[in-house]
C-alpha cells in the first residue's frame, strides 16, 4: 500500500489547523470545526496535527470523547480533560447549583493557563446538551482565551434542528471561526493508495465512495475482493487475532469507547479471558492506550465489533461490567444505567436511571435527562406510584427542553396516575404544570380549563403549596391577558398563602406579578416595590437558574411596563442591566425579550433605523422568544408603514397570526394596524381595528387613547374611547394640540409630537412638523402635514427629500454597513455594541458577514476593500 489513506489529500486541512494554532499563539483564540462523514478521517487528521504541528510549537493537546450511548454521562468530554485542568471527577459527578458556575470555572482555568492549549472534543454529534452548552459558552468567549477549540462531528448526520445544529448556528458568528470539511478521496488518491495491491482502484473508489476509512480497511485485506460492507473488512481483520484477543476487544466494545484499563482487565478476568491478550489487542492497533485509558482507534471499529457479539454473550459481558462498577462503588450513574439496561437488570435501571437523569438535569442536559427517565419508566410499569413520579419528572425535563408536546403528555399521564392513586395534591400539581405547558404552547383555552380543574380540586383540600401554585398560575395567566386587576387579586391570594406556608420563593414569584400588575393599574409606588424586590434578589445573589430567571423577569418588567405608559425615566438603565444579566448567565430567552423591548424603546424614541436593525436581528435569530418576535414584527411593520413601504402589511399580518399568544401585546398590534390604516386612508379598516382594541384592551387608557387618536385623525370621533384616554390623547381629543405636542416632546417621542404639531392652526408649528417628519423618514405622515400647511393657505410648502435608489455594491446589509463604518471609525466591538444597541455577539456576526462578502481576512482588509468599491458611506468621492 502506497500510504495511509488518512493523510492523503489532507495537507491543506493540516495547514488550516496550523494557521489557527498560530493565531492562538499570538493571543487570538480560535474555534475549528472538523466535519465529514463517518470514516472521513476527522480523528486521524486531528491526531496527526497534535503529534506534528502542535508538538513542534510546544502546545499541549487535550482530547475529550463524546459517547453514542443513550445513557451517556453529562459532560463526558470534560471527564477526559478535567485532570489536566485540575478538575476532579468528583466535582463533575456532583451537579453544581447551576451549570453556569461550572462553565465559569472551566473558563477561568483555561484563562489562567500560562501557555496556549488545544482542546479537542471528538464526535460532538453525540454530545449531551450540557457538553453542547459548554462548547457554546467557550466558543463565544474563545477570543479571550489561549485556546484552540477543535470540534469534530459527522456532517452527514446533522440537521439544523438538532441540538448540535443549533449550537453550530450560534457559533457561526464567532470571529475567526475555521470550518474544515473533509471531502472523500479522489479517484487519483485511491489509485495511488491501491497501487501494488492488485485491487481494481476504480472499483474500490466506486464501492467505498472514497471514504478514507473504508478504503484503508479494504486495503488492509489485499488478498480479498472488495467486501460488501466495511463491517466485513473490520471483522476480517479482527479474525486474525487470537481467540483470547478477540474476546478482549469484544469486552472492550461492551465497556465502551472511554474505558479505564483496570476496569477492562477486571471484567476480562471475570469472563475468564487472560490478561496477556490485552497487549495483543493493543499491539495490533485495534486498541490504543493513552495513560490509564484505552480507546478504539475508530468508532466504526467499536460498533462493528459490538454488533458482531452474539446477544447472549453481549448480555453476559454487560452483567460483568455492571457488577464490577457496582463493586467499585462508582457514581457514574449514566454508565451504570447503560450496562444495567443492556444486561436486562430492570431493578438496577430503575435505581440508576433517575440518578443519572438528575445529574444530567443539573448540568442543563434536559433532553438527556428525559431519555434516561424513559428507561426507568419502562421498568416501573407495574409500580403505579413510581411510574407517576417518573412521568412527572420527565414532564418537567421535556418542558425545560422546550419539548412542549412531550411535557403535556407526561403531566397529563402523571395527573391521571395520581388520580388513580387517590393523591389529589399530586394530581393538581401536575395539572398546574400542564396548564403552564399549554400556555407556553399557545393553547390558552386548554390552559384555563386545566387550571380551573386543578384549582377546584385544591380548594376542597387543606391549604397547600399546590394551592398557592394555582393562585400564582392564575395571576400570571391573567396578567399576560391584560387583566391586571384580576391578576392582582390572585397574586395577593398566592402571596398570603405562600407566606403562611413558609414558601418564600413562591411568594416572591407572586410578588413580582402583583407589583407589575399594580404598575399597570397606575400605582406608582408599586414600581418602587418591584425595584426593591429586584434589589433583594441581587443582594441574595443569583445562585441558581430559578433565582436568575426571577431576577431577569423583574428586570424585564421594570424596563418594559413603563414604556406602555410612555414613561422612559428608568427604562434605558434597566434595558442595559437586563441585557447584561442575560448575556452574563446565557439566558437566551430573556436576552431575546430584552431585545424585543429595545425595539419598542427605539421606535418610540424615533431612532427607527436602529429599531429596524434590532428587529431584523431578532427575526433572523435561530430561536427568538415568540414575544420578542411579535414585538419585532409589530414595530417593524409600524416603521415601514410610516415610511410608506409595501412590506408593512406583510409584517403586520405575520404579527396578527401570532398575536393570539399574548392579548397584552395584541393591543399594540391593533393600534399599529389602525395607524397603518389611517396612513393608507383606509377608514373602514381603521374602524375594525378600533373595535378589536376596545375588546382586547379592556379599560387600558393608553391603548384606548391611542385608538381614539387615530380615529380622530381620520375624522371619526369615538366618544366611548375618549373618556378613558390617557393624558396626551385626552389633550388631542380636546384639540389642545400644542399642549399634546409639548407632552410628547418632553417624553422624547418626536413622531407623535410632530403629528400633534401638524394638527395645530399655527403654520410655523406645522412647518416644523414637516421638517421633523422628513428627518424621521415618515413619508405618509409628512404628506399629511404638507396638506395641512396648504389648508392653512401657505403657498410655499417645503418639498420632501429625494429618495436614494442606490444599492450597496458589495451587497452589505444596512446593519453590516453600520458595523463596518464603526470599525472604520476605530471602534472596538464593545464600543460598536454600545453605539448600535447590540450585543457583542451580534456585532461579531455582522462583521463575519461583511468579511465574507468582501473576501477579507481582517478588520483593516474589510474597511479597505469596502472603501475601494465605495461600499462605505465615508468612501471618498
Image (cartoon, rainbow, N blue to C red):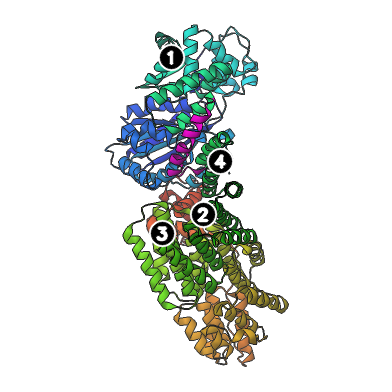
Residue pointed to by mark 3: 503
Residue pointed to by mark 2: 869
Residue 130 in picture, x, y percent from top left: 45, 41
Give the mark nearest the N terminus, 2 or 1. Answer: 1
Residue 2 in picture, x, y percent from top left: 51, 13
Q: 485 or 532, which is in the foreground?
A: 485
Residue at mark 2 to residue at mark 3: CA–CA distance: 65 Å
- Dot 4: within a 10 Å radius of its alpha carbon, few (fewer than 14), some, or many (20 or more) residues? many
Give the mark nearest the N terminus, 1 or 4. Answer: 1
Give the mark nearest the N terminus, 3 or 1. Answer: 1
Residue 827 in picture, x, y percent from top left: 38, 58
Q: Do the residues labelled 2 and 3 touch (CB within 8 Å)?
A: no
Q: Is residue 332 at all visible to an observer of this figure?
A: yes
Residue pointed to by mark 1: 270
Per the rendered image, the range of residues in magenta is 344-366
Q: Does residue 481 show up magenta in the picture?
A: no
Q: Are marks 1 and 4 in contact (CB under 8 Å)?
A: no
Amino acid at each position: 500500500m502506497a500510504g495511509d489513506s488518512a493523510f492523503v489529500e489532507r495537507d491543506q486541512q493540516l495547514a488550516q489547523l496550523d494557521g489557527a494554532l498560530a493565531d492562538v499563539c499570538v493571543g487570538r483564540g480560535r474555534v475549528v470545526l472538523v466535519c465529514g462523514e463517518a470514516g472521513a478521517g476527522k480523528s486521524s487528521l486531528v491526531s496527526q496535527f497534535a503529534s506534528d504541528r502542535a508538538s513542534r510549537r510546544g502546545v499541549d493537546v487535550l482530547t475529550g470523547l463524546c459517547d453514542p450511548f443513550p445513557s451517556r454521562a453529562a459532560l463526558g468530554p470534560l471527564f477526559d480533560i478535567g485532570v489536566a485542568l485540575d478538575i476532579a471527577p468528583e466535582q463533575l459527578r456532583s451537579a453544581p447549583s447551576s451549570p453556569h458556575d461550572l462553565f465559569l470555572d472551566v473558563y477561568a482555568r483555561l484563562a489562567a493557563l500560562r501557555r496556549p492549549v488545544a482542546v479537542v472534543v471528538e464526535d460532538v454529534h453525540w454530545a449531551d446538551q450540557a457538553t453542547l452548552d459548554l462548547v457554546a459558552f467557550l466558543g463565544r468567549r474563545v477570543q479571550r482565551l489561549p485556546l484552540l477549540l477543535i470540534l469534530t462531528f459527522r456532517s452527514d448526520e446533522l440537521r439544523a434542528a438538532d441540538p448540535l445544529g443549533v449550537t453550530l448556528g450560534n457559533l457561526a458568528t464567532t470571529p475567526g471561526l475555521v470550518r474544515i470539511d473533509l471531502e472523500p478521496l479522489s479517484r487519483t488518491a485511491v489509485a495511488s493508495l491501491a497501487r501494488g495491491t492488485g485491487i481494481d482502484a476504480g472499483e474500490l473508489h466506486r464501492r467505498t465512495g472514497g471514504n478514507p476509512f473504508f478504503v484503508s480497511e479494504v486495503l488492509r485485506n489485499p488478498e480479498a475482493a472488495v467486501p460488501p460492507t466495511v463491517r466485513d473488512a473490520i471483522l476480517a481483520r479482527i479474525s486474525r487475532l487470537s481467540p483470547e484477543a478477540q474476546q478482549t476487544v469484544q469486552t472492550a466494545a461492551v465497556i465502551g469507547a472511554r474505558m479505564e484499563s483496570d476496569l477492562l482487565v477486571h471484567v476480562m478476568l471475570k469472563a475468564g479471558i487472560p490478561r496477556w491478550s490485552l497487549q495483543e489487542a493493543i499491539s495490533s492497533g485495534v486498541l490504543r492506550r493513552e495513560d490509564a485509558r484505552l480507546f478504539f482507534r475508530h468508532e466504526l471499529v467499536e460498533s462493528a465489533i459490538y454488533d458482531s457479539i452474539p446477544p447472549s454473550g453481549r448480555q453476559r459481558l454487560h452483567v460483568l461490567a455492571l457488577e464490577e462498577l457496582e463493586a467499585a462503588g462508582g457514581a457514574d450513574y449514566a454508565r451504570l444505567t447503560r450496562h444495567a439496561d443492556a444486561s436486562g437488570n430492570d431493578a438496577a435501571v430503575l435505581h440508576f436511571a433517575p440518578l443519572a437523569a438528575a445529574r444530567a438535569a443539573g448540568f442543563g442536559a434536559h433532553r438527556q435527562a428525559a431519555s434516561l427517565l424513559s428507561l426507568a419508566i419502562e421498568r416501573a410499569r407495574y409500580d403505579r406510584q413510581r411510574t407517576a413520579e417518573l412521568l412527572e419528572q420527565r414532564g418537567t425535563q421535556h418542558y425545560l427542553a422546550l419539548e412542549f408536546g412531550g411535557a403535556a403528555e407526561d403531566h397529563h399521564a402523571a395527573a391521571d396516575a395520581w388520580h388513580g392513586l387517590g393523591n389529589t395534591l399530586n394530581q393538581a400539581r401536575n395539572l398546574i404544570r400542564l396548564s403552564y405547558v399549554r400556555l407556553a404552547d399557545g393553547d390558552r383555552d386548554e390552559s384555563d380549563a386545566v387550571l380551573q380543574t386543578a384549582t377546584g380540586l385544591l380548594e376542597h383540600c387543606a391549604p397547600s403549596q399546590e394551592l398557592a401554585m394555582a393562585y400564582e398560575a392564575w395571576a400570571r395567566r391573567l396578567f399576560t391577558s391584560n387583566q391586571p386587576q384580576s391578576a392582582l387579586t390572585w397574586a395577593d391570594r398566592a402571596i398570603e398563602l405562600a407566606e403562611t406556608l413558609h414558601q418564600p420563593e413562591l411568594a416572591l414569584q407572586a410578588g413580582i406579578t402583583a407589583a407589575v400588575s399594580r404598575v399597570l393599574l397606575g400605582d406608582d409606588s408599586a414600581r418602587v416595590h418591584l425595584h426593591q424586590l429586584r434589589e433583594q434578589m441581587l443582594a441574595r445573589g443569583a445562585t441558581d437558574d430559578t433565582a436568575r430567571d426571577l431576577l431577569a423577569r423583574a428586570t424585564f418588567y421594570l424596563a418594559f411596563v413603563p414604556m406602555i405608559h410612555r414613561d422612559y425615566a428608568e427604562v434605558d438603565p434597566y434595558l442595559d442591566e437586563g441585557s447584561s444579566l442575560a448575556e452574563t448567565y446565557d439566558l437566551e430567552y430573556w436576552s431575546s425579550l430584552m431585545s424585543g423591548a429595545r425595539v419598542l424603546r427605539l421606535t418610540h424614541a424615533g431612532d427607527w433605523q436602529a429599531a429596524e436593525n434590532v428587529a431584523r436581528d431578532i427575526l433572523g435569530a435561530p430561536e427568538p422568544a415568540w414575544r420578542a418576535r411579535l414585538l419585532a414584527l409589530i414595530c417593524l411593520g409600524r416603521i415601514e408603514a410610516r415610511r410608506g413601504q409595501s412590506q408593512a402589511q406583510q409584517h403586520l399580518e405575520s404579527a396578527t397570526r401570532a398575536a393570539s399568544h399574548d392579548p397584552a401585546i395584541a393591543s399594540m398590534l391593533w393600534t399599529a394596524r389602525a395607524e397603518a390604516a389611517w396612513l393608507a386612508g383606509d377608514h373602514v379598516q381603521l374602524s375594525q381595528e378600533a373595535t378589536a382594541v376596545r375588546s382586547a384592551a379592556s379599560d387600558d387608557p393608553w391603548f384606548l387613547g391611542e385608538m381614539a387618536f387615530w380615529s380622530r385623525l381620520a375624522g371619526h370621533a369615538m366618544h366611548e374611547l375618549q373618556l378613558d384616554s390617557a393624558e396626551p390623547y385626552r389633550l388631542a381629543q380636546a384639540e389642545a394640540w400644542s399642549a399634546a405636542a409639548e407632552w410628547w416632546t418632553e417624553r422624547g417621542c418626536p413622531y407623535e409630537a410632530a403629528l400633534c404639531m401638524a394638527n395645530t392652526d399655527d403654520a410655523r408649528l406645522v412647518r416644523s412638523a414637516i421638517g421633523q417628519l422628513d428627518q424621521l423618514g415618515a413619508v405618509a405622515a409628512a404628506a399629511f402635514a404638507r396638506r395641512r400647511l396648504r389648508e392653512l393657505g401657505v403657498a410655499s410648502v417645503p418639498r420632501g427629500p429625494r429618495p436614494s435608489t442606490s444599492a450597496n455594491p458589495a451587497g452589505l446589509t444596512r446593519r453590516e454597513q453600520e458595523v463596518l463604518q464603526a470599525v472604520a471609525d476605530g471602534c472596538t466591538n464593545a464600543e460598536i455594541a454600545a453605539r448600535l444597541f447590540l450585543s457583542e455577539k451580534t456585532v461579531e456576526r455582522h462583521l463575519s458577514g461583511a468579511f465574507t462578502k468582501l473576501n477579507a481576512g481582517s478588520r483593516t482588509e474589510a474597511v479597505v476593500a469596502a472603501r475601494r468599491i465605495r461600499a462605505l458611506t465615508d468612501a471618498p468621492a
